[in-house]
Image: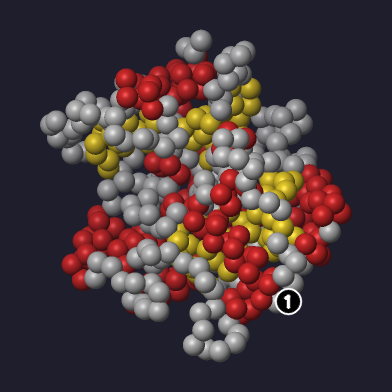
């Protein structure tokens, strides 16, 4: 690792309003990362921190990858920016082709965004516009799921189901409802992988169809594995049943794969793992290994073709972003895909899955551990909450873990783990050995 350079800590922390952060606590005791390589971050006091979260679920190929860095430098020297409206550049088309080849079935069309939040907004807008293009303009209702996370824009928090992300911001979009989440804490406690019990939860969609009339529903959006709420694994057969109900009623099914995409659960995408093809897939994060903001929405031939009508000189979809398909982001994306292919990272989660699963479940015997869950290279350790002080115990674990040299993520009183896919068994041992020490000594 490169040693941290001197004078890395800023003198004034007040100007930066940090996202999803306890700003006052952080600025009293800052945790500064100044370098990264492979599986480790370096702090401003030159400590090595094992990355147990792939940054924010995004650095799937690890840190400081030379191939990506070189591709970005070369692209900046060649073409820094090209407008995406009525203009193009070669790498945008090349990357879209490479991405479409990773998807099964006819998910052959890619719309570029800059984040998972934008990918979700894009997919929701396309869903409503698609039905209108087909003469079913009454289909405007959107269905999300309780405890779902779909980014932070208004569409995303409206279909999302995490109360803390919603309650501050008013009444949300109209015409949105939610099916039940898939967490059955008593029946499925300490289950390894997919729970056997709970496929019947998908029938809650039929309840909403009966309530609202399915002819008014444009789309259902779910995370195949609900990540940010604390790693909720879908019961066996659940996603297939959602697909059947959506098909029956002419409703589009959207998989939010911002987290599960690009190898996180041992297959290229969750559509492969669960053998279910939705009508759209939202992605971001691992697309560029977290190096440059970029997202992508995959859509089927049927959706794309529905817009390709009318005069050929007319814009078919009045939607897009200044940075859609940014040349530098595309270069980073192409280099990232090359690394995934060369190193077999999109299936590495399957190779290490059993070792990872055993490590996650090795913490189940600790007194404060309420449940553990896992799939691919994702894990969750749910802790007993302190009465009257929700989130405090897990946040204390986060702080202690950082001091002991590992980076974990917490949501509520749940610890979520999602390491870079380059992780080795020795790293898994280090991660869970340290985490065990932390949890054993928690108040």
| Residue 421 rendering spot, x and y as whole percentages | 43, 47
Residue 185 occupies which quadrant of the picture?
Answer: top right
| Residue 94 rendering spot, x and y as whole percentages | 39, 74
Q: Vertical placement of 124 versus 204: above or below?
A: below
Describe the colour scheme in one phrase.
secondary structure
| Residue 379 rendering spot, x and y as whole percentages | 54, 36
Identify the residue shown where x is 43% and y is 42%: 56
Quadrant (top left, top right, bottom left, bottom right) of the N terminus = top left
Q: In this view, which residue lies farthest toward the left?
A: 6
What is the number of callouts on the image? 1
Q: In this view, which residue lies farthest toward the front?
A: 170
Secondary element type, mark 1: loop
Q: Vertical placement of 234 versus 390: above or below?
A: below
Identify the residue shown where x is 60% and y is 78%: 307
Q: Is residue 316 visible?
A: yes
Q: Is residue 353 visible?
A: no
Q: Which residue is mark 1?
A: 135
Identify the residue shown where x is 77% and y is 62%: 216
Q: How many other residues sit within 10 Å of disc 1, few (<14), some (14-19) or many (≥20)?
A: few
Q: Vertical placement of 127 versus 116: above or below?
A: below
Q: Vertical placement of 209 versus 204: above or below?
A: below
Left or right, 88 with respect to 144, comes to: left
| Residue 174 rendering spot, x and y as whole percentages | 68, 51
Residue 254 occupies which quadrant of the picture?
Answer: bottom right
Identify the residue shown where x is 43% and y is 64%: 321
């Amino acid at each position: 690792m490169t040693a941290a350079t001197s004078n890395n800590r800023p003198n004034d922390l007040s100007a930066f309003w940090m996202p999803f952060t306890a700003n006052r606590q952080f600025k009293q005791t800052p945790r500064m990362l100044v370098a990264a390589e492979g599986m480790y971050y370096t702090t401003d006091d030159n400590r090595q921190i094992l990355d147990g979260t792939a940054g924010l679920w995004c650095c799937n190929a690890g840190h400081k990858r030379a191939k990506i860095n070189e591709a970005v430098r070369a692209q900046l020297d060649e073409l820094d920016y090209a407008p995406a409206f009525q203009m193009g550049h070669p790498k945008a088309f090349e990357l879209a082709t490479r991405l479409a080849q990773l998807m099964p079935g006819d998910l052959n069309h890619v719309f570029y965004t800059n984040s998972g939040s934008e990918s979700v907004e894009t997919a929701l807008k396309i869903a409503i516009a698609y039905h209108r293009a087909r003469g079913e303009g009454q289909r405007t209702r959107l269905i999300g799921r309780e405890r779902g996370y779909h980014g932070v824009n208004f569409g995303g928090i409206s279909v999302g189901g995490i109360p803390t992300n919603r309650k501050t911001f008013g009444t949300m979009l109209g015409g949105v409802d939610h099916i039940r989440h898939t967490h059955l804490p008593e029946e499925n406690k300490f289950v390894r992988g997919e729970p056997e019990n709970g496929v019947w939860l998908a029938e809650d969609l039929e309840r909403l169809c009966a309530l609202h009339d399915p002819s008014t529903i444009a789309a259902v959006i779910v995370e195949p594995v609900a990540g940010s709420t604390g790693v909720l694994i879908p019961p066996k057969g659940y996603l297939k049943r959602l697909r059947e109900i959506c098909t029956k009623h002419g409703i589009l099914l959207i998989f939010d794969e911002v987290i599960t995409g690009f190898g996180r659960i041992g297959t290229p995408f969750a559509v492969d793992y669960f053998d279910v093809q939705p009508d759209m897939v939202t992605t971001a994060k691992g697309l560029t290994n977290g190096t440059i903001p970029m997202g992508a929405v995959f859509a089927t031939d049927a959706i794309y073709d529905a817009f390709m009508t009318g005069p050929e000189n007319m814009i078919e979809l009045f939607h897009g972003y200044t940075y859609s398909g940014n040349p530098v982001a595309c270069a980073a994306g192409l280099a990232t895909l090359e690394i995934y292919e060369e190193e077999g990272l999109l299936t590495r989660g399957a190779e290490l899955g059993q070792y990872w699963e055993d490590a996650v479940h090795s913490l189940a015997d600790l007194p404060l551990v309420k449940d553990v869950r896992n799939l691919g290279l994702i894990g969750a350790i749910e802790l007993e909450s302190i009465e009257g002080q929700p989130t405090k115990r897990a946040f204390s674990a986060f702080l202690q873990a950082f001091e002991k040299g590992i980076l974990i993520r917490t949501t509520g009183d749940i610890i979520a783990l999602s390491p870079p896919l380059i992780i080795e068994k020795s790293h898994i041992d280090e991660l869970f050995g340290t985490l065990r020490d932390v949890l054993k000594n928690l108040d």
